[in-house]
Image (cartoon, rainbow, N blue to C red):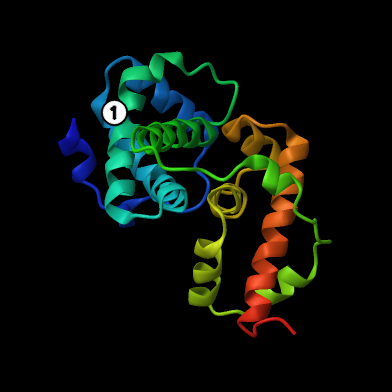
Amino acid sequence: METIFRTYSAGDDVAGNPDDADDAELVRAVAAGDRAALAALYRRHSQVLLAQLMLEVGEQTLSEELLQDTMLAVWRGAASFRGDAKVRTWLIAIARRQARDRLRRHRLRSVDDTLLTESPAAEPGPEQHALGRAEAAAVASAIHALSRPHRELIGLVFGAGLTMAEAAQVLEIPLGTVKSRLSAARAALTQALTEKGYVR
């Protein structure tokens, strides 16, 4: 199984948003034991999954291991896909569980969600202007300096292109919490970019 994934580099990932119906068909084929369908899913989604795992755990090697674990879990659990969500949302949820389980085993502490909901929310606007002016490296650095839940949500919404409702489904939290957490994350990102001189 491992050789299927190693055949393709992250650069082989299909750009953009793959067709949901095609993805669902691939998952059904994986459930029937089709390895080529699993490889196709990997090509379509590995970049997004790896980026999300990087935001989750912050380490390339561990993220790559977790991506392999995720695809193995997909192979074993494809029959459980009910079609209630997009395939990409389902895959990200699996990757997130793999990361959470690994972090739990290593007894790494996570940020208390209550601290995030108590953060002051900022009105959207300046951060969009700031992101347009800031260099990509500075933005990446600022994102990585955020707390793990903030990084994760920004990755889901802006990186993976999920809607807030889909992000709520992946994170298993209420939509209202996603909205307030995203607002706090954007405010924290704007503040970090302001401190770096990208927002005046």
Residue 196 placement: quadrant: bottom right
Relative depth, front residue between 25 and 7: 7
The answer to whether 9 appears left or right of 185 in the picture is: left
Residue 36 visible in this rendered orientation of the protein:
yes
| Residue lying farthest to the left in this orientation | 3
Q: Is residue 163 above or below residue 72?
A: below
The answer to whether 60 appears left or right of 163 in the picture is: left
Give neighbour class at mark 1: few <14, some 14-19, many 20+ (Cα, 10 Å). some
Q: Is residue 196 above or below residue 75?
A: below
Relative depth, front residue between 88 and 154: 154
What is the x, y in percent for residue 175?
74, 35
What is the x, y in percent for residue 1?
18, 30
Residue drawn at (29%, 28%) of the image: 72
Relative depth, front residue between 24 and 162: 162
Residue 133 visible in this rendered orientation of the protein:
no
Q: Which residue position holds label 1?
A: 72
Q: Say what secondary structure mark 1 lies in.
A: helix
Q: Is residue 147 above or below residue 99?
A: below
Q: Is residue 5 above or below residue 29?
A: below
The answer to whether 30 appears left or right of 140 in the picture is: left
